[in-house]
């Protein structure tokens, strides 16, 4: 058995970044930017008014000025403003040449084409200089997940097509005679394939493209047939059948299909019967079938693998730390990812840690991490956890 850290290292050795593709800006949200984007012009491209008002050279309370024209957004005033003159101006409009400031309209009394500056004149210019937002040459760096704000900025930089990391295609295979899909009518000895759906959701959230394959039954023939449907997946994830019971066929069948195994079994709870290797063109991860084990391995192993494939770097799931709300017992020989609830007071570790309890996982928002042989801990002791 290897440690979680060692397993991650071996997984990263199999999970190379996948290359890039160009997508329209509207499809770039949630994708990983694969090349720096550089602005080719200033924004705003001209000095622009920040307010509705009057563009003038200078103004003092009581000044009387002649209005000689108008500058609106998208329609500049072509002339220049002279002494004793003003140009009616609106937010976002180009400031006419000669103007040094904009007097906001609330500070002006207008009578025909004549304005009088009021008493409450402020000292602001109300002008956004050219390049005030960003200058030509401004850079958005590659290697980040694009969110809505980034999309707005890239649009403002006039970027219509964006080079992004290709999304990992993931084939998800459940195994087991006892499984039916949600919505089907289970027989008396059957249960619903659950972690398959959870992993699909996790993979989608991570920016991968998961595809559910038919459930493989517990026969060599069925598993072989389903593994033959993998096509061009970058990553094949099997669920269940990964330990050494009579009906646990994944290692055997994958081996017969030529999988080069990188490891089988990790010193962790839950999730011990984890395996990985290379199967044909794809990376393969065999997850344990117990629902919580599969989901925990999803957070601890699959998520970092997907990030690595997206070019976001090879690093473990980020941890945080928080104080315990109560005492907990000594840990055994395997690293333990305990289902826990974090609130303002700290971490409460649930009593029931059986790896079949999705109701407990559903109530958890953290996995409290206990190193192998971690001694008993007291209330107030700080523990590391993975937010989930
Ligand atoms: P296995 O690793 O195939 O021995 O499965 C371990 C336990 O997990 C068994 O109780 C299975 O019924 C259950 N199990 C396996 N795969 C799934 C799945 N996709 N969804 C829910 N439970 C599963
Ligand atoms: Mg099984």
Image: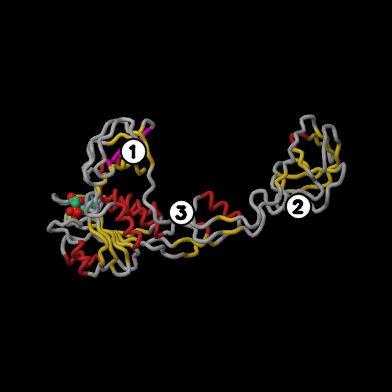
Residue at which label 2 appears: 76
Q: How many marks?
A: 3
Between tags 1 and 2, which lies in front? 1
Mark 3, secondary structure of its residue: loop
Does the magenta run of residues contain 224? no
Q: Residue at x 84, y 46 (%)?
A: 68
Between tags 1 and 3, which lies in front? 1
Residue 30 got which mark?
Answer: 3
Which range of residues does the magenta coloring cover?
338-343
**Mark 2 and 3 residues: CB-CB less than 8 Å, in contact?**
no
* Coordinates of residue 220 in the picture (x, y in percent): 17, 65
Whether the residue carrying mark 2 lies under 8 Å from ligand 1 is answered with: no
Mark 1, secondary structure of its residue: strand
**Mark 1 and 2 residues: CB-CB less than 8 Å, in contact?**
no
Is 386 left or right of 243, judged from the image as shown?
right
Q: Residue at x 27, y 62 (%)?
A: 262
């Amino acid at each position: 058995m290897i440690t979680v850290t060692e397993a991650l290292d071996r997984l990263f050795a199999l999970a190379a970044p996948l290359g890039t593709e160009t997508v329209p800006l509207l499809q770039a949200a949630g994708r990983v930017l694969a090349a720096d984007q550089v602005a080719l012009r200033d924004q705003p491209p001209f000095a622009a008014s920040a307010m509705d008002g009057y563009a003038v050279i200078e103004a003092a309370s009581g000044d009387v000025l002649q209005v000689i024209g108008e500058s609106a957004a998208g329609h500049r005033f072509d002339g220049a403003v002279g002494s004793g003159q003003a140009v009616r101006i609106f937010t976002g409009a180009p400031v006419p040449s000669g103007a040094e400031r904009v007097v906001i309209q609330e500070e002006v009394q207008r009578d025909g084409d004549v304005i009088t500056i009021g008493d409450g004149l402020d000292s602001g210019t109300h002008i956004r200089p050219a390049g005030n937002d960003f200058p030509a040459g401004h850079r958005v760096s590659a290697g980040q997940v694009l969110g809505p704000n980034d999309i707005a900025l890239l649009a403002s930089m006039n970027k219509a097509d964006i080079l992004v990391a290709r999304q990992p295609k993931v084939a998800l295979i459940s195994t087991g005679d006892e499984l039916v899909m949600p919505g089907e009518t289970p027989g008396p000895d059957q249960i619903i394939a659950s972690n398959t759906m959870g992993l699909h959701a996790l993979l989608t959230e991570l920016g991968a493209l998961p595809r559910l394959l038919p459930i493989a039954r517990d026969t060599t023939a069925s598993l072989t047939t389903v593994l033959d449907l993998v096509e061009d997946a970058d990553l094949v994830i099997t669920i269940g059948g990964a330990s050494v019971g009579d009906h646990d066929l994944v290692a055997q069948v994958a081996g017969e299909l030529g999988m080069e195994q990188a490891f089988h079994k990790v010193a962790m709870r839950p999730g011990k019967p984890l395996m990985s290797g290379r199967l044909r063109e794809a990376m393969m991860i065999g997850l344990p079938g117990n629902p919580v084990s599969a989901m925990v391995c999803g957070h601890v192993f699959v998520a970092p693998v997907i990030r690595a494939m997206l070019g976001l770097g090879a690093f473990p799931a980020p941890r945080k730390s928080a104080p315990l709300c109560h005492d907990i017992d000594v840990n055994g020989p395997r690293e333990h990812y305990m289902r826990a609830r974090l609130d303002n007071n700290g971490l409460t570790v649930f009593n029931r840690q059986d790896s079949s309890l999705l109701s407990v996982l559903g109530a958890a928002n953290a996995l409290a991490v206990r190193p192998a042989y971690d001694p008993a801990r007291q209330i107030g002791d700080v523990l590391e956890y993975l937010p989930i």
